[in-house]
Amino acid sequence: MDNLIGRYRNVTLLVAILFAQVLGLAVQVKRNNENESSRLIRIWTVGAITPLEKGIVHLQAGTNGLWRNYLFLRGVRQENRELKAQIEQLRLEQVRLKEDAEQARRLQLLLGFKEQFISKTMPAQVIGSSGSEQSRSVYIDKGSRDALEKDMPVISADGVVGKILRVFGSTSQVLLINDQSSGVGTILEQSRLQGVLRGSPTGEVMLEKIMNDEQVQLGERVLTSGGDQIFPKGLLVGTVSKSGRGKESFLDIHVKPSANLSRLEEVLVITRREEKSPNTAVVPLRALDILTQRLPSVPDKPAVAPGKSQPGAGSLATAATPNASAPAVVKTPVPAGGEIKPASSPAQAAKPSIVQTSTSGQVGKTAPAVQKTEPAAKKKSSSETPAKPQQVEADPEPSPSTEKPQ
Amino acid sequence: MPITYTSREQIEVYRFRAPVAILVPLLALFLQAFIPLRVSFFSIFDLPLLIVIFFALARRSQLSGLLTGAVIGILQDALTGKPIGVYGISKTVVGYGASSLGVKLDVENAGSRFLVTLGFYIVHEIVYFAVARGLVGQTLKWSWSHEFGAAFANAVFAVVLFAFLDRFKQRT
């Protein structure tokens, strides 16, 4: 036996080494988390390779900076003039966008949406790649010492780049969106179709899980949907470059990434996100603003004598229904657990109002419990012909229980 | 073609200094990871594979060849996001094969180097795809035209690279 092994020593060793590697592969695949079993090898290799990459990249950046900032200043004056003109244009655009943003915030508030804000990012320099056509990932010069963590989204000025796959001491590996194993929840900007963005074996980016019977326009922008719980909603991913019928019942959609994934230099890692409702402190005022805008005929709120204020007096219902000739249907937010009582005073009884309340405090988010001030309305209806009720809906989605304006 | 059978007496076995044996593979890994960021088409080359072939052919030792292939392959795996061992297995096979061939054939001239590299690149890709598909479950797309194009490019590059690396050879 020893003779046999000695005779075929090299072949035996070859088989042994191959077997060991196959075994190692099987363990990694079965665990589906190679971080523990092979982390040491990765740390050593990355530790040996990336310092050199980092040094060269920083040296290159320094040289470029010196050249661009101090030596090569040709055309700077012209560029400065152009930039100033551009600033003027952007200022004008900013005013318009600010108005739009305010309106969007108000609407989001009324719908009870919570926005996700990118509250903190960390700039990083791309220092290396995986060096393999089968693995599309890059290394950046920030790691766990800079508080980076696995699965943090990585973006560039142009769009989404990928997510952090592994974190080392001073470097991190970023899985690009064109890798086969990546997946990004996306939505098409115009058609609002949702799908999953994946890389193909050839490095193309494909949008999957969109049914064959849907229409997708070429050039349509693809944004993150936020459904993957990694990328914030609304980031630009790319544009549809090709669309056709695919296998099974899904469309075969090719996406051109907006970020140039083959020539990445600087990226931003989103290190913190916040989820909050926009300006919740001014909820009643904003709703009132909207009501005021939509009810130009409603006069100013009458002065209420001290001590006569009713429950919910500060709410929109009382503010918007002072006119007996124009009873209004108003949805109004009240504190959780609160309720709007029927009008009890004669003055209020003479002013029929139909009030919809939401116990959630957020109009439109939950199905509002409709409370009509029926006692007052009934008393009045016997003696007067009520005018056509005006309805003011703070909720853009009409509820089945809401009375429509006539 | 300039591939000729060589008797064992005629075969020259080379060795390398330790710094060369360590730094050249590391430099190849570094360049493989660094250059494609600046020159994207460079990813078609597989510098670590060429280094494995060069060392295996020069040392003409099967044991040395398969160990060199295994180590360089595993290091290359460590830089990718994939499980470690896919490149390791394919380069182990190539290292063993190239050293076995080096024992029997004269692979010192440009023509034989070109053909040997061309052949072993294809072997490497076949083993890689088999392992990646069969064991890891990756979905890879095989394209003969792409593989032959890449093999040709690597073979041409190998001729130049091997001529440069010949300077570091030392006769035993």
Image (tube, rainbow, N blue to C red):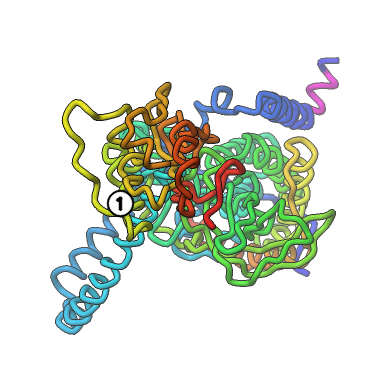
Q: Residue at x 40, y 29 (%)?
A: A340
In front of the other: A192 or A21: A192
The quadrant of the picture occupied by the N terminus of chain B is: bottom right
In front of the other: B114 or A404: A404
Q: What percent of the width, then of the height, locates residue B48? A: 57, 49
Total residue callouts: 1
In the picture, measured across the screen, residue B104 lies left or right of residue A46, that is: right
Q: What percent of the width, then of the height, locates residue A244? A: 75, 67
Residue occupied by mark 1: A289
Q: What percent of the width, then of the height, locates residue B49? A: 62, 50
Occupied quadrant, residue A203: bottom right
Q: Residue at x 80, y 39 (%)?
A: B134
The verdict on residue B8 being magenta is no
Q: What percent of the width, then of the height, locates residue B111? A: 70, 68
Residue at mark 1: chain = A
Q: For the magenta stretch, what is the residue range?
A: A3-8
Occupied quadrant, residue A190: bottom right
The verdict on residue A5 being magenta is yes
Q: Residue at x 37, y 42 (%)?
A: A351
In front of the other: A109 or A176: A109
In the picture, measured across the screen, residue B57 lies left or right of residue A146, that is: right
